[in-house]
Amino acid sequence: MASIADPRKNLLLAALPDEEFARWLPQIEHVRLPLGKAIFESGSSPAHVYFPTTAIVSLLYVLEDGASAEIAIVGNDGVVGISLFMGGASTPSRAVVQSAGEGFRLRADLMMREFNRFGHVMHLLLRYTQALITQMTQTAVCNRHHSLDQQLCRWLLLSLDRLQSDEIVMTQELIANMLGVRREGVTEAAGQLQEAGMIRYRRGRITVLDRARLEQRTCECYAVVRKEYERLLPVRVS
């Protein structure tokens, strides 16, 4: 049975051919990712790229007044630090652990060496980047045009796809910060989902009781993102 510290619990690492995975294995470092840990700050150049296995990392855009909103999430589906191999070196977004867990990291110079082999790794990472851009784009559309209820359902489903359980450890205040809305709005939306029997919320833990109904209640944005990940990546997100 695979342990929690199995790098192939990350789907990008699992997609590496055996020969390339064997070359990476001595170089990747197992790391714990506690809730709230900032992996990257806005404007910084990453020293490592991170491959979450049981954690979820939120990519946030931070405004000058300190307000922030989530633009995408990364879990066992991908890698944190695409600016490194996309040529930008740094990014205006901030990467923060939104669900505690574990993962692996690879030094930036080693990642660039692998990417510049212009082989399987480069094509895999570029496909992942396209999927991530789709998530960012759809998040912007969703936040502009869809109800908070639908946004919350989308956020819950995307998070579930990147976890190994039906429970998400997250306070309503943190969810509000992620979605860029007032806490009272999240409280009301979460209360409606709980009354409908779709989730159970208590003490900072959200348990999804009826995923099928969540999928029916959310907007088309979730399906667009999921379909693109399944089209571009060799393994399903969940």
Image: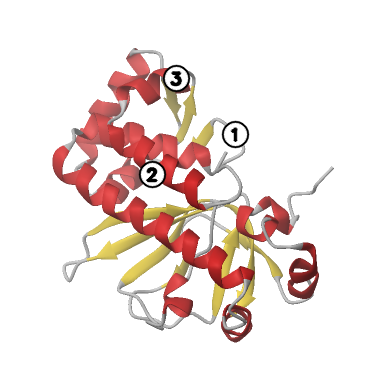
63 vs 32, left or right, is left
Residue at 37% x, 54% y is 72
Q: Which residue is mark 3?
A: 212
Residue 218 image-quadrant placement: top left
Q: Amino acid at mark 2?
A: Val
| Circle 3: residue type | Ala
The residue under label 1 is 165
Tell me how many marks there are.
3
First reached walking from the N terminus: tag 2 or tag 3? 3
Q: Nearer the viewer, mark 1 or mark 2?
A: 2
In this view, 148 is above or below 113:
above
Q: CA distance from mark 1 to mark 2?
A: 20 Å
Most foreground residue, 26 or 21:
21
Disc with the residue nearer the chain's start (1 vs 2): 1
Instruction: Give the class, few, some or many, for how many residues have Cα within 10 Å of label 3's Cα (few <14, many ≥20).
Output: few
Distance between the alpha carbons at the discs numbered 3 and 1: 15 Å
- Tell me, for residue 225, which label it has, or none: 2
In the displayed image of the protein, which residue is found farthest to the top?
196
**Residue toward you, 167 or 106:** 106
Please state, as top left, top right, bottom left or bottom right, where the N terminus lies in the image: top right
Identify the element where label 2 is drawn: helix
Q: Are marks 2 and 3 in contact (CB under 8 Å)?
A: no
The residue drawn where x is 46% and y is 79% is 84
Seen from the viewer's position, the closer of residues 227 and 41 is 227
Q: Amino acid at mark 1?
A: Ser
